[in-house]
Amino acid sequence: MLVECTAKLDEIEGSMYKELFDYIGALDYFIANPRTVKKLDEHRFIVKVSLYGYEKFIMALALIRSVEGKKAAFFTLYASGTLKALSKHAFQSMHNSTTAREGK
Amino acid sequence: MDYYDIALSSGLEKLGGMLGYKKILVAGKDFPVAEIGSNENQSGRVAIGSDTNTLLKACRAFASAVILNTYAIDKSLIEGLKEYHTILIIPFNQIIGNTGFKLSKSLYLARRLFLYAKKKRIEVGFATLADSELGMESYIQLIELAKLIGASDEDARKGLNIAGRLVNV
């Protein structure tokens, strides 16, 4: 999964998984088993999730609006089975993201 | 299939490309908003509100779509939507902002509303109705949230496509 966070990733990464755990629950978290595979920049990263738990992972990520009291939203931008496809999509959409944020 | 989202404040439409939408529609800018309580013809307009009586009035005045800000089921409104072939749009802004017990209750009510509308064969759309970046979702997330309230994959994708019709009204 290619994920974008509105807050800086370094500040919230550890707590993000705690928050995810609260939404998914202990029984489903171990099935999804989400792990950060690659950090692309300070807002974007690639997460590896089990095929059996990816739907719950997306739902939980959609509902998180604060991490450790800091306001943060997560956007699942793309989902694919291969790291290559995700990296390619990340590179292509990097321009969109930069122009959208700078345009605000 | 192209996906569309509806937002309340302008400036958010710039995020559309990044989040996977063809366009993020801004209420009042990309489509006209119906004047609630007015007796004039509201054809081509979208009614937004939580009072079901005034929404029903807008529906009778031929509004194209109704965005119901509350998840309470009003049978007369649903019948009105069916009779006048009006689109019902379920916003996720109350689900996204909530946590804990309130979140569960909102999900339950939204699910009940969606399943009742589906049973009555009303066209249902989904939108975030966000007023800031924190209220936004990507199209992948919105599809999963629609599934969470009982929609099938096909219903969810169609629901995100429906808002596109409002551009041409």
Image: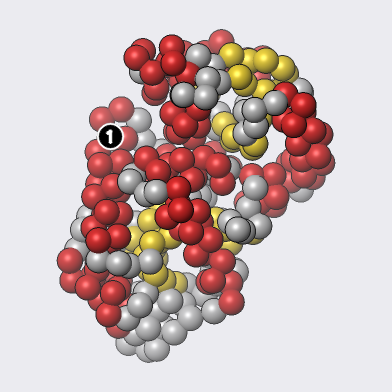
Q: Residue A24 placed where, x, y %?
A: 39, 22
A7 left or right of B108 in image:
right
Q: Residue A13 placed where, x, y %?
A: 60, 15
Q: Residue B102 placed where, x, y %?
A: 27, 35
At x 37%, y 40%, the residue is B148
What coloring was used for the rendering?
secondary structure
Q: Residue A61 placed where, x, y %?
A: 50, 29
Q: Is residue B142 above or below residue B55?
A: above
- Give neighbour class at mark 1: few <14, some 14-19, many 20+ (Cα, 10 Å): few
Which amino acid type is marked by label 1? Ser
Instruction: Residue B165: tell me if it is visible.
Output: yes
Taking depth in this image into account, of A7 and B71 the one nearest to the observer is B71
Q: Quadrant of residue B19?
A: top right
Q: How many marks?
A: 1
**What residue is pinned by disc 1?**
B104
A35 left or right of A85 in image:
left
Q: Is residue B62 above or below residue A12?
A: below
Taking depth in this image into account, of A66 and A41 the one nearest to the observer is A41
Instruction: Residue A42: tell me if it is visible.
Output: no
Q: Which residue ends up furthest to the left in the rendered image?
A: B75
At x 46%, y 53%, the residue is B154
B41 left or right of B9 in image:
left
Q: Quadrant of residue B67?
A: bottom left
Q: Quadrant of the N terminus of chain B?
A: bottom right
At x 52%, y 50%, the residue is B131
B87 left or right of A42 in image:
left
At x 52%, y 20%, the residue is A50
Q: Quadrant of the C terminus of chain B?
A: bottom right
The subunit letter for the residue under badge 1 reads B
Q: Secondary structure at mark 1?
A: helix
Q: Which residue ends up furthest to the bottom in the rendered image?
A: B40
